[in-house]
Amino acid sequence: MTDTPTYGFDTLQIHAGARPDPATGARQVPIYQTTAYVFRDADHAAALFNLQEVGYIYSRLTNPTVSALAERIAALEGGAGAVCCSSGHAAQIMALFPLMGPGCNVVASTRLYGGTMQQFANTIRKFGWSAKFVDFDDLAALEAAVDGDTRAIFCESIANPGGYITDIPAVAKVADKVGLPLIVDNTSATPYLCRPIELGATLVVHSTTKYLTGNGTVTGGCIVDSGKFDWSASDKFPSLSAPEPAYHGLKFHEALGGMAFTFHSIAIGLRDLGMTMNPQAAHYTLMGIETLSLRMARHVENARAVAKWLEADPRVEAVTYAGLESSPYYGRIARVCPKGAGALFTVAVKGGYAACVKLVDSLQLFSHVANLGDTRSLIIHPASTTHRQLPEDRQIAAGAGPNIVRLSIGIEDPADIIADLDQALDKATA
Ligand SMILES: *Cc1c(COP(=O)(O)O)cnc(C)c1O
C-alpha cells in the first residue's frame, strides 16, 4: 500500500497515495482523464488480465487518480487495501457483494442512515438478499439474530442521525465469536475521530460525499478492507475462498491473501457492477481530505458549543449529541471515537412537526439540504424528507420522529451559528 506507513495522520492525509507524477513531476495528483491505458505488449496485457502484474487496463476498473485516493483512505483507516466507487450507497452494495448470495442475510443495526435502511429493507431483496434489524446495544439479541445464512454484521460508528455511538469493540467480539465479518460505516465519524479496524472491524465503508470531501461538491464512496479476515475459515464465502467462476476459477484468498477482498471488488465488483468513481470526483475528494483533521477538530468544537447552548434552551425538549455529558453514549467516546463525537446531532423541538418545519424555513445561515458533513451548517427535518417513507414507529426507532430536526454543524463562527438558531427558534415556537 502506501510507501509512507510510519507517518502520522496529519501527514498521511496529505501524502499517502501521492507521489510526484512519473511523467511530468507534477506535485499534485494529476486528473488522469482517460478511459484506457496502452499495454506495453501482448505479454504485459495478459499479465494484467491475470492479476499477475498490477497496472491499469480500463477506468471502469482502476484509474491512477482514483487509486491515489483509495490508497490515501486505506492509509488513514489503517487498512490493507481500499476501493473507491461512485457513492456511499454503491460502497455498501460493493461491500456486501463478495460476501452474499441468494438467500443470505446481513444483520444490521436499527440505527442507520435513512437511505441505508431503505436499501437494506427493500432494495437488496431484488438480489435475494435480506437484512435483519437489531438493537446493537442488546448484544444477546445481536448474536441470536445471526443464523446459518448470515454473511455480515453491519453498523455505523457514529450513527446518523441520532447521536448514537456503536460499541464497536463489543460488537466486534460478537462478530468474531460467530465467525462473520463486521462492516462499519464510518461516514459520520471519519478515520480522524474513529478507527473501526483498530476496534475489530473487518471492512469500513464510507460515503466520501460527506466529511472526506468536506465541502459538498461530489458524491463518492469507498470500501476499506482490514486484510485480516480469514475468508477460508468456513465455506460461507465461496467467492473469496473457492474457485471463482466469474474470474476463470481464481481462488482469490489463496492467491492474494489479505488483498483478496480488494482485488475481488475491483476485478469482479467494479468490472461487472460498474459503480465506478470518476477521476474528477477523486480529485475533489483528494483536495478535501488534505484538511480532514483540521476540519473535523473544528466541526467537533462547534458542535459541542451549539449542542450545549441548545440543551440549555427552554424552546428545546432534548438534544441527542453523544458529546454532551447527559448522553447515555457519552461514556463510549473515549473507547470508540476519542477525538470527539462528530458534528451531527438531532434536536427535539417543542411544538412538534409544525415547529420543525417553521424552524427549517426560518433559518438564514443554515442550508436546508439532504446532505451532511459540509463546511456549511446544514439542517433537515427527517420525518418530512429522508425518513418520510418509513412508518412512524421505524422513524422513532431510527431517532427521526416528527418533532426531530437533524443538524450538521459546519466550521463557521460558532456565535453566528447560534445566533441563527436563536432567531429561528423564536419564530418556530412563537
Ligand atoms: C450519505 C450517507 C450514505 C450514502 O452515501 P451517498 O454518497 O449519498 O450514496 C451512507 N451512510 C451514511 C452514514 C451517510 O451519511
Image: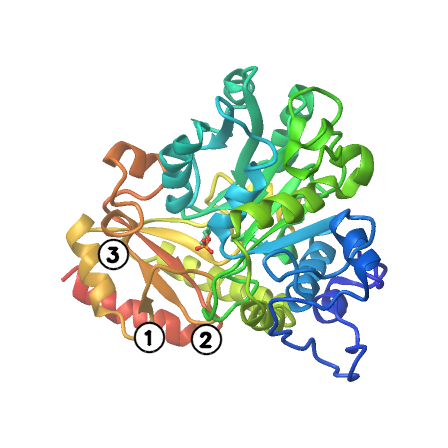
Q: Secondary structure at mark 3?
A: loop
How far separated are the C-alphas under marks 1 and 2? Answer: 10 Å
Neighbours of disc 1 within 10 Å: few (<14), some (14-19), many (20+): some
Image point 77% across, 47% down: which residue?
Answer: 50
Q: Secondary structure at mark 1?
A: loop
Neighbours of disc 3 within 10 Å: few (<14), some (14-19), many (20+): some
Between marks 3 and 2 in the image, the one whose residue lies nearer the viewer: 2
How far separated are the C-alphas under marks 3 and 2? Answer: 23 Å
Given the image, on which type of amino acid does mark 1 rest?
Leu
Q: Position of residue 153 (x, y in %)?
A: 56, 30
Task: Give the labeled residue for mark 1.
Answer: 365
Instruction: State which quarter of the image contains the N terminus.
Output: bottom right
Given the image, on which type of amino acid does mark 2 rest?
Glu
In the rendered image of this protein, does residue 40 appear above or below residue 353?
below
**Which quadrant of the figure has residue 216?**
bottom left
Badge number at residue 315: 3
Between marks 1 and 3 in the image, the one whose residue lies nearer the viewer: 1
The tag earlier along the polypeptide, 1 or 3, is 3
Given the image, on which type of amino acid does mark 3 rest?
Arg
Residues tagged 1 and 2 counted as in contact (Cβ below 8 A): yes
Badge number at residue 412: 2
How far separated are the C-alphas under marks 1 and 3? Answer: 19 Å
Toward the viewer: 207 or 7? 207
Q: Quick check: can you spot residue 339? A: no
Image point 42% across, 71% down: which residue?
Answer: 376
Q: Secondary structure at mark 2?
A: loop
Toward the viewer: 172 or 129? 129
Instruction: State which quarter of the image contains the C terminus.
Output: bottom left
